[in-house]
Image (tube, rainbow, N blue to C red):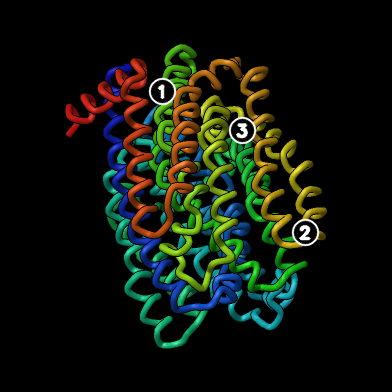
Amino acid sequence: MDNKELKGKMINATKWATLTEIAAKIVTPITNMILARILAPEAFGVVATITMIISFADMFTDAGFQKYLVQREFKDKEEKLKNTNVAFWTNLGISLFLWGIIIIFSDLIATLVGNPGLGIVVAISCMVLPLTSFSSIQMALYRRSFDFRTLFTVRVGTVCIPFFITIPLALFGLGYWSLIIGMIAGQLFSAIVLTVKSEWKPSLFYKFKILRQMLSFSIWSLIEGVMIWFTIWVDVLIISGALSVYYLGIYKTSIMMVDALFGLIIASTAPVLFSALSRLQHDNEKFNLFFFKIQRYVSLIVFPLGIGVYLYSDLATQIFLGNDWYEASDVIGYWALTSAIMVGVGRYCSEVYRAKGRPKLSILAQVLHLVVLIPVCLISVKYGFWVLVIARSWVRLQGIIVNLFIMKFAIGISIIKILKNVLPSAFFATLMGLLGYLLQQMNEGLIWDFISILLCMIFYFSLNILFRDTRLDLIGLVQQMKKRS
């Protein structure tokens, strides 16, 4: 695949991946906005611990085979199909085994995560494990071929099903069960549709020699996944053991709403970037060019988004969660601000490591971050919920620093170049933030908030258009999108 063809596929894939995430990030927040006005924070706290268990088990179910199938350069179609079959049957077998273990020890697991007496909830919820094994391999094949159009159809259907199931069940008073049933229904839909639509169908083929080859790569992706899981969930583990399920619901729901905003950008670019970089892993010049371009586009959006949500966190909380969730405002503000820095500067480093076939670097980055993150969370929670929120938010900067040094000394990408690449967006977003703060001092009220937000947006994008390099990038991107449409 030449550079021109790859660039075209990447732009087209980015378009469909973006449309997918836009649709998902419209439907999902609307669903959560409605549910937040029906269900108490405690219900979301229960589901947060269930999700934590499922996500941990799901790492072992996939075992890193998705990334392997995307990154691997197969010599022919037959070799790819053989590897796909081995990955599928391995995933299914592990998922059924883990579900059985969870059922047997469900009461103990529920107690360990701070939900004693809810063992049956844990056991039923984890039926999603074998369901995801049916779809995960097909998703990897679609991503490998840049077929994000099919994934768009499946994802939109999946996020819409809970909207029509979860909300009615919540209105009937089923509490956290409404969230769990909606989650299972969504995964069932995804598994059925992806299996039916996929050109590849599982066949009775299995070879342990291929499994050993796959594990030589995938074991490191699995270890990396475990490290990432601890990075994401260690704070939830600590809160569930030290504080009430009410604060757990406030905390995790707030973070989830912020992550939904930034996830729109990440989910529409990271899979495409990884697929493109994997094809360019042996051409450093083109590899670096793609990486810097995506990072620049992403920073253009996430920096003003993070600063804006931080300044208007009270308004964001009122819109997304309602008046009963006023305590979530500060959580949303701090998490949005640090998320902007994390995504704009350090988030895509892990895609670089994996695309280069060096997942050990991502593991190293996660370990070096965890040795700081875990003590910070354990110490800060002793001083109360809000100290934990602030400490957990800002300790993410240490993880960014770690990734920058690994990029410099292991990959050969300059820290100065990375920072200079996002400097214009960061500077203009900071100026926008200062304008927003001044506008807030001039007046108050809901209408004025929306007027001032609009003024900040106009100010920010005007500055970027005046900056020549950014203007040329935007013009080029629009022209390429028109060619592919």
Is 19 located above or below residue 180 in the figure?
A: above
| Residue 93 seen from this side | no
Q: In 3D space, how far apart are the residues under numbered discs 3 and 2 (Cα atoms)?
A: 32 Å
Residue 64 spot, x, y in % from top left: 56, 44
Question: Residue 381, labelled with which disc?
Answer: 2
Decide: few, some or many residues near mark 3? Use Cα within 10 Å; few <14, some 14-19, many ≥20: many
Give the mark, 3 or 2, whose residue is nearer the N terminus: 3
Amino acid type at circle 3 is Pro
Q: Of helix, strand and loop, which one carries label 1?
A: helix
Is 130 located above or below residue 358 in the figure?
A: below
Decide: few, some or many residues near mark 2? Use Cα within 10 Å; few <14, some 14-19, many ≥20: many
Residue 398 spot, x, y in % from top left: 70, 35
Residue 389 spot, x, y in % from top left: 67, 55
Q: Residue at x 42, y 24 (%)?
A: 279
Quarter that holds the N terminus: top left
Q: In 3D space, how far apart are the residues under numbered discs 3 and 1 (Cα atoms)?
A: 22 Å
Q: Residue at x 36, y 21 (%)?
A: 470
Q: In 3D space, how far apart are the residues under numbered discs 1 and 2 (Cα atoms)?
A: 39 Å
Q: Nearer the viewer, mark 3 or mark 1?
A: 1
Amino acid type at circle 2 is Val
Q: Are marks 3 and 1 in contact (CB under 8 Å)?
A: no
Q: Nearer the viewer, residue 216 or 383?
A: 383
Residue located beneath label 3 in the image: 359
Q: Residue at x 35, y 39 (%)?
A: 457
Q: Nearer the viewer, mark 1 or mark 2?
A: 2
Q: Residue furthest bottom?
A: 172
Amino acid type at circle 1 is Lys
Q: Of helix, strand and loop, which one carries label 3?
A: helix
Q: In the image, 481: left or right of 264?
A: left
Q: Nearer the viewer, residue 437 or 196?
A: 437
Residue located beneath label 1 in the image: 293
Give the mark, 3 or 1, whose residue is nearer the N terminus: 1
